[in-house]
Amino acid sequence: MSDHRPPRDASRDLYRRSGARKAPPPAAAPRESEGTVKEVTSLANPVVKELRALHMKKERAESGLFLAEGLKLVTDALEEGWPIRTLVHAARVKDQPLVKRAVATAKARGALVLETSDEVLTKICRRDNPQMVVAAFEQKIGRLADLTNPTGVWVALEGVKDPGNLGTIVRTVDSVGASGVILLGDTTDPFALEAVRATMGSLFHVPLYAASLEDFVAWKRATGIGVWGTHLKGAVDYRSVDWPETCVLMMGNEQSGISDAHVAACDGIVKIPMAGRADSLNLAVATAVTLYEIRRSRLTV
């Protein structure tokens, strides 16, 4: 998987090329208190306000940061080596072994660690009964042109709008051992809290790239990778395809499926047969069904 990982700062060039979101400014110089533990009880603390602001897409785009809630997500990110800026934990869980390990790792990487109350965590998380560990990490999303030798199965998503769908697809890509996700056009933010939650930690294992249709077509031409799309008007049963080991599965958005322009970029169009009265499948479900078929011969119990 190491050759699939996007470089840490690739997103800044990507934003300018795709126009998907504003490029984040260069990372700020380390704060004086980074790498230490600080007790915070005030809801008006500026760091608390900064973390709370990461619920908004504009703030995530400008800062290049996002929130991960819960010890599992934070631990997954730390184990995968994601750059961490701030870690917050409830004072009442500070002696738990896994929390102590996460704090030690964050401190060693120069992060600011806040020990705080449930009330402050509620404010940061914007909900009652918040997770006891929350962290701000740097976003990582690659420039498709830098993926010069793609291998394995990739999922390209055109204009996906629902963060829960996107997060579930990332989780499914991880579960079947596919290689990564390519976001095409104007998609929902993969670092929105709902999307991050839905990945169940797979965000930190699955490489993400983003591109315009023009850039995707140029990349397809340069790499020679085959692209298959799913469409209700498809005439080929997805189970009848001899899926190559390296390919792209393109899925459309929740409302209209793959657009004509993106259909033109595909080498083949397939359809999932439906026997009941429903006229369509949820995007995440359709992606999962197709991915498991593509990877069927390569999955073992």
Image: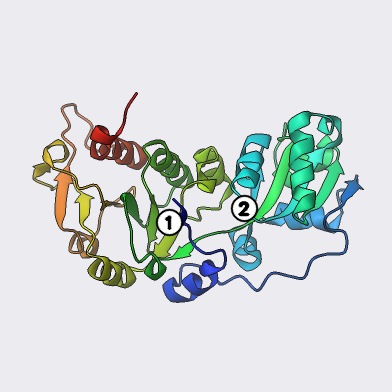
User: What SS does tag 2 mark?
Assistant: loop
Residue at point 56% right, 72% down?
23
Task: Name the quadrant containing residue 96.
Answer: top right
Query: Cβ–Cβ below 8 Å for labels 1 and 2?
Result: no
54 left or right, relative to 120: left
User: What SS does tag 1 mark?
Assistant: helix
Q: Residues within 10 Å of mark 2 (few under 14, many from 20)?
A: some
Relative depth, front residue between 250 and 8: 8
Residue at point 75% right, 58% down?
50
Identity of the amino acid at label 1? His
Residue at point 55% right, 53% down?
191
Q: Which residue bears the numbered disc 1?
A: 4
Q: Position of residue 131 (x, y in %)?
A: 71, 35
Q: Position of residue 250 (x, y in %)?
A: 27, 53
Q: Which residue bears the numbered disc 2?
A: 82
Q: Which residue extends farthest left?
A: 235
Q: Residues within 10 Å of mark 1 (few under 14, many from 20)?
A: some
Q: Which mark is residue 99?
A: none
Check the picture and name the quadrant holding the C terminus.
top left
Q: Which residue extends farthest top?
A: 301
Task: Name the quadrant containing residue 119.
Answer: top right
Is residue 270 visible in this depiction of the protein? yes
Task: Name the quadrant containing residue 19.
Answer: bottom left
Q: How many marks?
A: 2
Q: Position of residue 253 (x, y in %)?
A: 33, 51
* Distance CA(mark 1)–CA(mark 2): 15 Å
Relative depth, front residue between 166 and 72: 72
126 left or right, relative to 92: left
Residue at point 16% right, 40% down?
238
